[in-house]
Amino acid sequence: MEYTTGFMKKFNNPFSALRHRDFRYYWGSMCISLIGTWMQNIAQPWLAYTLTKSPFLLSLVGALQFTPMLLFSLFAGVVVDRFPKRHLLFFTQAASLLITLTLALLVWTGYVRYWHILVLATTLGFVNTLDMPTRQTFMIELVGKEDLMNAIALNSSVFNMARVIGPALAGLIMATMGTAFCFYINSFSFAAVIFALFFIHPETGRERKEIKGGIWSDIKDGLGYIAHNEVLSKTLLTVVIVGVFGMNLSVLVPVFAKEILGQQETGYGLLMSFVGMGSFAGAMLIATMSRSGPQKFFLNIVPIFLAVLLMLTGLTDLFIMTGLSLAASGLCFVAFISSANSTLQLNSSDEYRGRVISLYTLVFGGSVPIGNLYSGIISNHLGPRAGFIACGGIILLLLGMRHLFGKKRY
């Protein structure tokens, strides 16, 4: 596939993927489930910070939740390529429901301790290690290649719509009803996806390839395939840089909100909603340009904008300015990551797509522990301002090194 060279292409219908019935069911259920997910994403860090008063212990929760992806994503990719994705999603959604319900009950009864959060976050991380590449590669079975980029962008749009609604709702619920109710809502929201899966019967992807080798040989084969494809390998390298240092907001924002801006639960939730609004705008921008294919501008230039915006966020003092800076950061991040995801899937053959996306999950999600610990340690010793500035600064440094030592540009 050739990259398009122009930035401004003719905009197309941003909802073209919704003409596929199965994708409508899937997308609709995600509208419900992801609101619950973002409520937990807000409530869990706040609960951990409230119990410990430590930015480092807060960052440890995020680190442990994403560590399973760092260790087992490559194995998950082999599983995704071998088994029906619909069946895998039944398992992952049911497991997620039970894990989050357990946390809700612990918080509601008052028995929750910091170690409970660590254990349950890690357990959920194991489930997400399989769930993320399964959901990503399931979309091409629902819409085909023609509407894949639009489906990815729409999926990102609902993710970020939830990122607007969920944090604001979580802040209000935590302040009025208690943190436990955020976890209850998330637990029951997984049932929406489970229900939708009963009505989804994708026409493509039903033929499974025969298992010819072992897991290790399949992993080695997949890594070799990626290494010899310049588009895949270079895109993944940029995803590593942006994924590690670009969005450590679950660590930085609660500390910044409390220590710099003097905010409580509601203010923290609203700041995260700003991120969601910007991210939603970024997703819809990509959706309207999806027929043009992934753009060089979003893959190469937008990560630089993101780095600068993170540094500017660390210098803000006013709530509204922080919110606007976070919104712009969210737009840049989603525009880049949606383009990168589409690039990887459209440039992968069917038999390798699960392994390619599992490596994407590894470098994007599995690298979060590194970024969480990096930003948490800096914030712990130098304050949250330094955390934002250090994340933006190292992105600029690493992108510059990638450009300097790369043989070719995209």
Image (tube, helix red, strand yellow):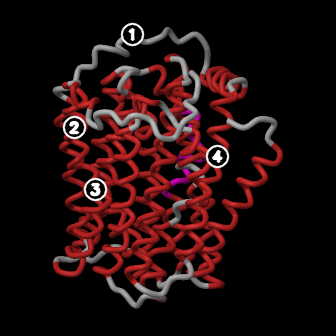
Tell me: residue 170, above or below residue 237.
below
Whichever of labels 1 and 3 marks the residue nearer the N terminus, that label is 3
Residue kind at label 4, given as amino acid type = Thr
- On the image, numbered disc 2 is attached to which residue? 194
Q: Gap between marks 1 and 3, in whole Å?
A: 34 Å
Image x and y of residue 50, in percent: 40, 82
Q: Gap between marks 3 and 4, in whole Å?
A: 26 Å
- On the image, numbered disc 3 is attached to which residue? 162
Tell me: residue 372, above or below residue 225.
below
Image x and y of residue 111, in percent: 30, 75
Q: Residues within 10 Å of mark 4 (few under 14, many from 20)?
A: many
- On the image, numbered disc 4 is attached to which residue? 238
Tell me: residue 345, above or below residue 308.
above
For the point 58% across and 33% down, which residue is it? 5
Q: Are marks 1 and 3 in contact (CB under 8 Å)?
A: no
Whichever of labels 1 and 4 marks the residue nearer the N terminus, that label is 1
Whichever of labels 3 and 2 marks the residue nearer the N terminus, that label is 3
Q: Quadrant of the C terminus?
A: top right
For the point 64% across and 46% down, which residue is it? 238
Residue kind at label 1, given as amino acid type = Glu
Q: Is residue 117 left or right of residue 386?
A: left
Q: Secondary structure at mark 4?
A: helix
Q: Is residue 56 magenta?
A: no
Q: Nearer the viewer, mark 2 or mark 4?
A: 4
The magenta-colored residue range is 65-75
Whichever of labels 3 and 4 marks the residue nearer the N terminus, that label is 3
Image x and y of residue 356, in percent: 56, 30
Q: Secondary structure at mark 1?
A: loop
Q: Secondary structure at mark 2?
A: helix
